[in-house]
Structure formats: C-alpha cells, structure tokens
Image (cartoon, helix red, strand yellow):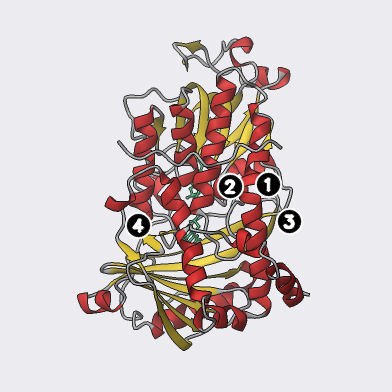
Amino acid sequence: MPPSPPDDLPGAPGASGAPSASDPPDRPVADGARPPASRDDHDRTATATATDRSEPVGGMFDVVVVGAGPAGASAARAAARAGATVCLLERAELPRYKTCGGGLVGLSVDHAGVDPSRLTRASVDQLTIAIDGRLTRTRRRPGRPMLSMVMRAEFDQALVESARAAGAVIRTGTHVTGIREHDAGAGRDIAAGRVADGHITDSHAIDDHAIDDHVVVAVRGGPDVVARVVVGADGTSGRVGAYVGVRLDQVDVGLEGEFPVDAAMARRWAGRMLIDLGPVPGSYAWLFPKGEILTVGVIGSRDDGGALRSYYADMVRRLGLDGVTPLHDSGHLTRVRAAGSPLRRGRVLVAGDAAGLLDPWTREGISFALRSGRLAGEAAARVAAGEPRALDDYPRQVEAVLGPEMDAGREVQAVFVRHPGLLYTFLAAVPGGFGLFGRIVAGQTTVANQLRRPGVRTLTAAITR
Ligand SMILES: Cc1cc2nc3c(=O)[nH]c(=O)nc-3n(C[C@H](O)[C@H](O)[C@H](O)COP(=O)(O)OP(=O)(O)OC[C@H]3O[C@@H](n4cnc5c(N)ncnc54)[C@H](O)[C@@H]3O)c2cc1C
C-alpha cells in the first residue's frame, strides 16, 4: 500500500499572456546538431490507443481530470479516495517521456503518496557550483541527501497507478480538444448522446436535466465525456488553462538531454549534482546524476532562446558528453502565473503547470503540481458529495499554501537576474549558505520562511532596489 501524502496542506479559507494551446510540448532541441532521439508527445498520440480498452469511451463522471502528470494523477487519486467517480484523460500512452530534470525536492517526496525508494535512481548529497563553467567548487552534506533523482516516465506511471488503485478510470491515448460548461444554450449544443448506464450511447437524445450543471469535455475522435467538475492538469501548453484564462508573467524554455554514460563517468557524478549559473541573466544549467544516465539541461527566458541553445551546447561539450548520443533530447516551456491569475472558471479548476504554479527561481514544479492537484481533487470530490461551494475554497487554498512560496521565488529570481555572483558566493563561500540551501531543497525549511527572518527582507529589498 503506497504511503498517503501528508495531511499538512492547510485548508485556509480565503492567488501576462494567456497560455497558447498551440505550443507543442517536448520539442526536440532545435540546434540542428543532433537528431532527436525520441518522438515527442504529439507523435505518440497520433497512433495512441486507450489503455483501459475494457472501459467504454465517453461517459459521465463526478470528476474528469485532463492530463496524467503529477498534478493530474494527484487530483485523480485524491478525488477517487474521497469517493467520487473519476476519469483521468491523457493524450499520450503511458509511460510517456516528459522533458524534466526528474529532481524530487523534499516536498515532492513528501507529497508523492507513492514509495519513492523503488523509483529513486540516485540521491544527491553533494553540489558542484560554477559560473558559466568557471570557479567550480564542490560542497558536501555526507549522508544527508537533498534531492532524489527519478525518471519522469517511471515516476508519473507510479502516480497514475496509485490513482487507478484508488478507483480512478484511466484513459490514455485520449486527446482533449475542448471544454464546454453546460448552461441552457450549451445543453442543447451538446445534445449529442443518450445517457444509458452512465454513458453516452446515442448522439441525438441526451436529457438536458441529466447534464444540468455539468461540464462537457470534448475528445478527439470520440464522444464527449461529461463531468460535474473538471480538473485541468494538462501542462504548460494545455487547453484548460486557456479556457480558465490563466495569465502568465514569466515564460522560460528548458533544453535537456539524457546521456547514457560508462561506469567511470557514472562514478564521477555519483551522489553529486552540478548547478552552473548561466551567462544569460536568470539562466542556469544542471547535471543530475541517475546512475549510468546523466540528465543535463539549461533553463532561462524564452526570449533568450538562441543564447540558451549555445549555452546548452557549451555545457554538453564541457562535460565531455558531446560525443554521446542522448536517449532523449528535447525542449519544453515553463510558465509562471501572474499574481491573481484565475485558478477556476465555473466548474473547471486548473492545477500544476496548467495553472502556472511553479517556483519562478528554480522552476521546480513537481511539488507544486502534486500539492495543487491534490487540493483540486479534494475540492472536486466535495462538489460531488453535495457541497457545491467547495470549489470556492480551491483558489484560496492554493494562494495560502503555494502563494508565499511563489512570491519568495520571484524575489530570489529578481536578485539572481541582477546579481548572479551573490548567489554563487552564498552557496560557495558564505558559512552556512550551502547548509541552508541543502535544508531548503530537502524540505526542512522554505525560501519563504527564510525571507521572513529579521534583516533578510531588508537586505533583499536593498539588493533589488
Ligand atoms: C527542462 C525542465 C526541467 C525540469 N526539471 C524539474 C525538476 O528537476 N524538478 C521539478 O520539480 N520540476 C522540474 N520541472 C518542472 C516540471 O517538469 C513540471 O512543473 C511538472 O511536470 C508539472 O506537472 P503537471 O502534472 O502540471 O504537468 P505535466 O507533467 O506536463 O503533465 C501534463 C500532462 O497532460 C497531458 N496533456 C496535455 N494536453 C492534453 C490534452 N489536450 N488532452 C489530454 N492530455 C493532455 C500531457 O501529455 C501530460 O502527460 C522541469 C521543467 C522543465 C521544462
């Protein structure tokens, strides 16, 4: 039985540019130097078929979740555990690749709700820090790991299996193409099927009352699926975020490769990650060790795409990996919501990347996806249980739990953009600096808590003035 996520998400009562549904995810790196070693998600879905073939396609559920990443799986599991009927729709076949470092911070491990030990490829207790390949310094916390390294395909699959075990129906190879909320007019629009045994079977006789106060989820090539509540967890390029009207104030691009290495190279990086502060303001690169696979990536503003491609190529060369054919080589956007951006429209909630919930500084997003997904799933299940006002709580809870962390990440990112040397000095040379970083990554404290300390706020304000 997998462990349950901790019950410490406070249910506190009452947090530009719209995301485009046309931005494809996980694009191959467009540097022309290497052919992509993997197909992207769109390629996969072109030939995809549903995993649960025994399940009828289309139907009515209390909760439909769109997207089976950490946010969607977490939402589906939470809603199913609370007793709702749940359908999780995912356009890819699982397991699917996701461009991601696969670094689990302590909060991600705490909130995963699956046993991380069998998924962890490596634990990291050492940090090598550098500035654009120079001033390399290594710091250690022997026996006190900060970060757990996973392959996202395996991690996400385990989360989905835990949602299935909780009772959620999983439909893969199912591409959601639109959302419509039922009202009097829309009810006639979607009079596209007869409800029989909870499923739409005939396309001309749906009973308006059967779908009153429901959301219709349109699926490519298949009948609509109907839900009382929809949770959009379809990532940075998701349609549901666009439907809800999510507004963004930071859009970054990450470029990443997964490199198979020999035993000697694997030993060199065992238990040690590299963070390199980049030449482009606000950018950095990483090497995350996963045994005989090294994940190398860079991230920075989408506006600096050309410079980031050069930076990525430099990193790969400096690390001696330019002769290695990567297993995957791709790019993906990360997007940070603007303060006050909507998290809900009617009976539709958004969670994780679809809502722009991630740390603006590190671009760590898995812990944000797991936590917001769970809150969304729980709120959705309460509606099904006869508490229609439960959806009002979701935005307030997200603001209360994740808002301070995002605000703190914005502040640190502002310092980092202007004074990358300060961050380097803090980690490489200031007594206690690396220890504090390790405690933050391990989840023993947060940046938000640290910024509230006397003197720290004044100092940050002075630096960013
Ligand atoms: C280069 C890079 C490195 C990163 N490294 C880290 C890291 O080391 N640690 C960390 O914590 N975070 C990292 N992140 C951020 C992290 O990857 C995301 O924050 C996290 O994946 C968000 O999870 P999610 O469930 O919201 O979205 P996703 O994981 O993107 O899942 C969305 C799902 O929705 C599906 N979907 C999309 N559209 C549709 C549709 N129309 N119909 C049906 N399904 C659909 C997709 O196929 C996908 O499976 C990184 C990001 C990047 C770009």
The residue singled out by tag 1 in the image is 246
The percent coordinates of residue 329 (x first, y second) are: 40, 66
User: Spatial distance from mark 1 to mark 4, Cα to Cα?
Assistant: 29 Å
Horizontal relation, residue 114 to residue 239: left or right = left
Residue corresponding to mark 4: 151
Residue 94 visible in the snapshot:
no
Q: Can you give x and y, in whole percent of width and height, for residue 283 in the image? A: 57, 74
Which quarter of the rendering shows the C terminus? Answer: bottom right
Q: Amino acid at mark 3?
A: Ser
Earlier along the polypeptide chain: callout 1 or callout 4?
A: 4
| Label 3 or label 4, whichever comes before in sequence order | 3
CB of mark 1 within 8 Å of CB of mark 2? yes
SS for tag 2?
A: helix
Residue at the spot 59% in from the left edge and 23% down from the top edge: 383
Which of pointers 2 and 4 lies earlier in the amino acid sequence? 4
Tags 3 and 2 in contact by the CB under 8 Å rule? no
Q: Is mark 2 within 8 Å of ligand 1?
A: yes
* Residue placed under numbered mark 2 in the picture: 354
10 Å crowding of disc 2: few (<14), some (14-19), many (20+): many
Is the CB of mark 3 within 8 Å of ligand 1? no
